[in-house]
Amino acid sequence: MRMLHTMLRVGNLQRSIDFYTKVLGMELLRTTDRPEQKYSLAFVGYDNEERTAVLELTYNYGVDRYDLGSAYGHIAIGVPDVKGVWLTVSGGSRLMMVVSIKQRYPGHAKQAAIVASQCHAGAYLGRFVVVVDDDIDPSNTDDVIWAMSTRCEPEQDIDILRRCWSGPLDPVIHPTKKGFNSRAIIDATRPYEWMKDFPPVAESSKEVLDATTKKWGAELFGSNGKK
C-alpha cells in the first residue's frame, strides 16, 4: 500500500503550476479540464505516478481563494494488484462490495478490504466487504459464496468496523440512530502463509460440464436448463 497523491484546491491554476514547477522544480505530469463539472486538474511531481506520490491541484471555476484549511482535499492511497471490484446489485449496489486481488504479501487482503471500505467512493452506506483471490470473478455471486465457504475461517478472517459512514436510507438502522453503521470485513482469500500448499480447486472440464448441463440441466439448474 502506498500514497498516490495529495489533493489541494487552488484559486489560480496556472500560477500554482508555475510555483511548483519553476520554483520547486517539479514536473507537470498531466492536466484535465471538466467544464461540465466546472473544475480543472493538474498533477505535478518529481517523478511519474507509478514511482512516487504526486500533488493534485484542483481549480473550481469561479473560486479564487480559500480560508485556512479549506484548500485541503484528500490523500489517495493505492493497494497493488487489485484485479476487480464489484458492488452487487442484490446489495443495492452499495451494501456489499467484492474485491479481487492477486496476493503479494502478508496482510494484503486486509489492506485491500480496509481501503475499499473506507475510501470515499466505497465508505457510504456499505455493510459487507469481501476480498477474494484473483481466480474468483467478483461479479459472480456463486463464485464469491464458494470462496467464502471454502477459504474463510470466520474466527480469524472476519473483522467488524464500528461507527462507519451510513445514511438515512440504511433500512436496518433505527430511525434515531441514522448516520452510523458497522462494516464486516471478510477475508475469503487463501491463507497467505500456506497459500502454495492450499488444496487445489477440484473442477470438471468444460466438456464434462457441457455434457452434464445438456443431460441434467433442467433438474440441476431449473426449467431453462442453464446455470
Image (spheres, rainbow, N blue to C red):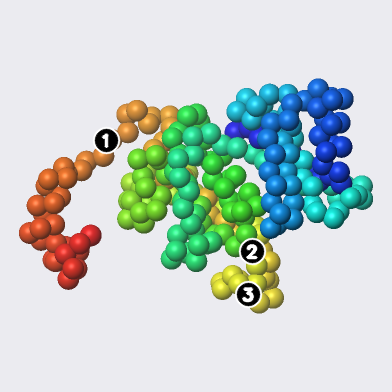
Q: Secondary structure at mark 3?
A: loop
* 156 relative position to 197: left or right: right
| Label 1 close to label 2 by CB (< 8 Å) | no
- Determine the secondary structure under disc 2: loop
Placement of 48 over or under 97, stated as above or below = above
Mark toward the start of the polypeptide (1 vs 3): 3
- Seen in the picture, residue 90 relative to 160 is either above or below; the reply is below
Which residue is pictured at 49% across the width and 39% down the height? 82
Residue named by callout 1 = 200
The residue carrying mark 3 is 174
Residue 12, horizontal then vertical, whole percent: 86, 43
The residue nearer to you, when weighing 216 against 38, is 38
Q: Earlier in the sequence, mark 3 or mark 2?
A: 2
Q: Residue at x 22, y 41 (%)?
A: 202
Q: Quadrant of the C terminus?
A: bottom left
Above or below for 22 versus 153: above
Measured in 3D between alpha carbons, the distance from the residue under mark 1 to the one under mark 2, in whole angstroms, is: 39 Å
Residues at marks 1 and 3 touching, judged by CB atoms closer than 8 Å: no
What amino acid is at disc 3? His
Q: Circle 3: is it few (<14), some (14-19), or many (20+) Cα within 10 Å?
A: few
x, y (%) of residue 113? 54, 45
Where is residue 158 shown, x and y percent of the image?
49, 49
Q: Residues within 10 Å of mark 2 (few under 14, many from 20)?
A: many
Q: Residue type at mark 2? A: Ser
